[in-house]
Image: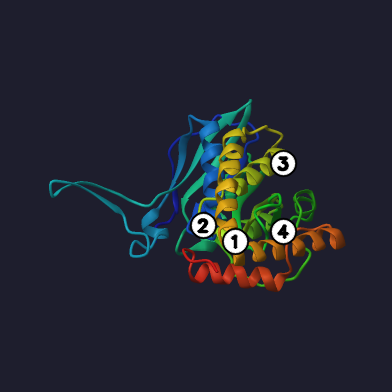
């Protein structure tokens, strides 16, 4: 393994930036986090790569194979999985974006490197995004909760009032490392209806981007995601209406969530339900229950 997991490509002219995290490969029900990240990066454009991580050290190419470009049998090139930090700006606010493939190995060293870089660039907080499958209906607003070692951030964003044990992503390793070094860090999670977890769910992305806006004092545009969410909801409504069992399931989910909101002001189901849905999704993300 090389002495350093990364190389500096450029020095950003950034003032007190926020570091946003989205690494592909971990749980992302409805591709809500990917859609949210694409929306945000599009608004930060142009973005400039400032750090490149050592993919050979971090990525298992048998699980994340490079893409081969062929032209009449001739190999024009290979596109390798990448992990990088890019810099962009919106409304006089600076953002760094950690993006690419979730590392397959050396998580602790990777988390240390990310926080080292965050300190070097003067980052004020680290915010990740994700989405998990949950027994909630698509007819209710998407709830966003958080994970963090920082109690103030947890209270500001919201959280699930339960104890639970679920598999962790590298976001969690970065949050723990940041917390140990007194840097605010959290991941925002959108609760996506489990029955649409294998399809794009732009409403989840809209909820994530809106929640991020409130934490960074920048109004990201969510109009395109909102329109896509409305169209998607109508499509789901049609699918549900065509099957009496689906209608019954939806009514039960609505009643369950409404009851929880009335009793404890939370739209997120309990820990056992969440753990079951998450573990089922991880076993087979293309075929949610």
Indicate the secondary structure of the residue bearing disc 1.
helix
Dots 4, 2 in contact, CB < 8 A: no
Indicate the secondary structure of the residue bearing disc 3.
helix
Q: Which residue is mark 2?
A: 110
Dots 3, 1 in contact, CB < 8 A: no
Labels 4 and 1: the sequence-earlier one:
4
What is the distance, in whole Å, between disc 4 and disc 2 at their CAs?
Answer: 18 Å
Q: Is residue 98 visible?
A: yes
Quadrant in which the N terminus is drawn: bottom left
Whole-percent x and y of residue 39?
54, 38
Q: Which residue is mark 4?
A: 149
Q: Residue at x 59, y 62 (%)?
A: 194
User: 146 left or right of 288?
Assistant: right
Quadrant of residue 49 within the rendered picture: top left
Label 3 environment density (alpha carbons within 10 Å; few <14, some 14–19, many ≥20): some
What is the distance, in whole Å, between disc 4 and disc 3 at their CAs?
Answer: 16 Å
Q: Residue at x 51, y 41 (%)?
A: 38
Q: Is residue 90 above or below residue 242?
A: above
Whole-percent x and y of residue 257?
75, 61
Foreground tag (3 vs 1): 3
Q: Nearer the viewer, residue 172 or 242?
A: 242
Q: Is residue 171 visible?
A: no
The image's mark for residue 173 is 1
Q: Nearer the viewer, residue 75 or 246?
A: 246
What is the distance, in whole Å, between disc 4 and disc 1 at their CAs?
Answer: 11 Å
């Amino acid at each position: 393994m090389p002495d350093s997991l990364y190389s500096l490509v450029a020095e950003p002219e950034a003032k007190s930036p926020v570091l946003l995290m989205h690494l592909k490969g971990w749980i992302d029900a409805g591709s809500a986090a990917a859609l949210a990240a694409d929306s945000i990066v599009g608004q930060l454009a142009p973005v400039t790569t400032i750090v490149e991580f050592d993919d050979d050290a971090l990525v298992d190419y048998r699980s994340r194979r490079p893409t081969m470009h062929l032209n009449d049998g001739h190999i024009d090139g290979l596109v390798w999985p990448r992990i990088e930090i890019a810099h962009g700006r919106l409304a006089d606010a600076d953002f760094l974006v950690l993006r690419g493939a979730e590392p397959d190995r050396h998580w602790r060293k990777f988390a240390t490197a990310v926080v080292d870089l965050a300190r070097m660039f003067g980052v004020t907080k680290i915010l990740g995004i994700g989405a998990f499958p949950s027994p909630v209906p698509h007819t209710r607003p998407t709830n966003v909760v958080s994970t963090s070692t920082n109690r103030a951030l947890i209270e500001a964003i919201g959280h699930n009032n339960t104890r639970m044990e679920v598999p962790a992503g590298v976001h969690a390793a970065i949050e723990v490392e940041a917390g140990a070094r007194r840097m605010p860090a959290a991941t925002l999670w959108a609760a996506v209806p489990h029955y649409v977890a294998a399809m794009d769910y732009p409403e989840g992305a809209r909820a994530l981007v809106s929640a991020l806006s409130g934490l960074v004092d920048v109004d990201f545009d969510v109009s395109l995601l909102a329109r896509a969410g409305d169209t998607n909801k109508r499509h789901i409504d049609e699918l549900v209406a065509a099957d009496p069992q689906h209608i019954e399931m939806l009514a039960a989910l609505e009643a369950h969530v409404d009851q929880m909101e009335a009793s404890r002001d939370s739209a997120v189901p309990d820990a056992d339900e969440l753990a079951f849905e998450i573990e089922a999704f991880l076993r087979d993300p293309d075929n949610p229950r």
